[in-house]
Image: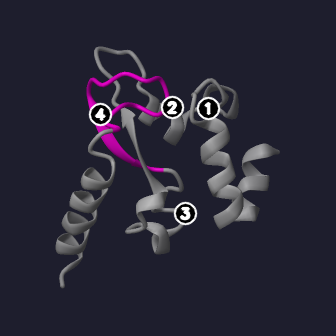
């Protein structure tokens, strides 16, 4: 199976798993959602296809930063403002304690 096929299969499985929970985990909106990785693929390629490493987060719109951008590129202080911060950090600690410690330093 090609990598693109694997990603498509993962996305369908993720959407099915969370079909009744399609909202931004960072702020609660149901608008402009995207699938985000809790631990970025660039940091842990091995977690790319893991459903538990994904969540719906909202996109940036009209110059307003969305939760996806805040989670990916924001400071630790900005990330702490997201409703999902504690849950995501718990996941990170379970999967990659070095990354967890780096984020908390």
Find residue 6 and report its horizontal and vertical position in percent: 24, 73
* Marks 3/2: CA–CA distance: 17 Å
Span highlighted in magenta in the image? 21-37
| Residue underneath mark 3 | 43
| Residue underneath mark 1 | 79
Tag 2 and tag 1, C-beta contact below 8 Å? yes
Locate the C terminus and report the quarter of the image it occupies. Answer: top right
Find residue 41 and report its horizontal and vertical position in percent: 45, 62
Locate the N terminus and report the quarter of the image it occupies. Answer: bottom left
The numbered mark at residue 37 is: none
Residue at the spot 40% in from the left edge and 61% down from the top edge: 51
Q: Earlier in the sequence, mark 3 or mark 1?
A: 3
Mark 1 Cα within 10 Å, few/some/many (few <14, many 20+)? many
Foreground: disc 4 or disc 1: 4
Residue at the spot 21% in from the left edge and 68% down from the top edge: 9
Foreground: disc 4 or disc 2: 4
* Marks 3/1: CA–CA distance: 17 Å
* Marks 2/1: CA–CA distance: 6 Å
| Residue underneath mark 4 | 33
* Marks 4/1: CA–CA distance: 17 Å
């Amino acid at each position: 199976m090609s990598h693109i096929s694997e990603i498509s299969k993962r996305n369908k499985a993720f959407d099915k798993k969370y079909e009744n929970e399609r909202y931004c985990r960072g702020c609660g909106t149901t608008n402009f959602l995207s699938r985000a990785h809790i631990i970025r693929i660039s940091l842990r390629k091995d977690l790319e296809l893991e459903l538990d490493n994904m969540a719906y987060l909202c996109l940036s719109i009209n110059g307003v930063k969305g939760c996806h951008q805040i989670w990916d590129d924001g400071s630790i202080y900005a990330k702490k403002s997201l409703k999902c911060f504690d849950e995501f950090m718990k996941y990170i600690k379970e999967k990659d304690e070095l990354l967890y410690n780096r984020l908390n330093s």
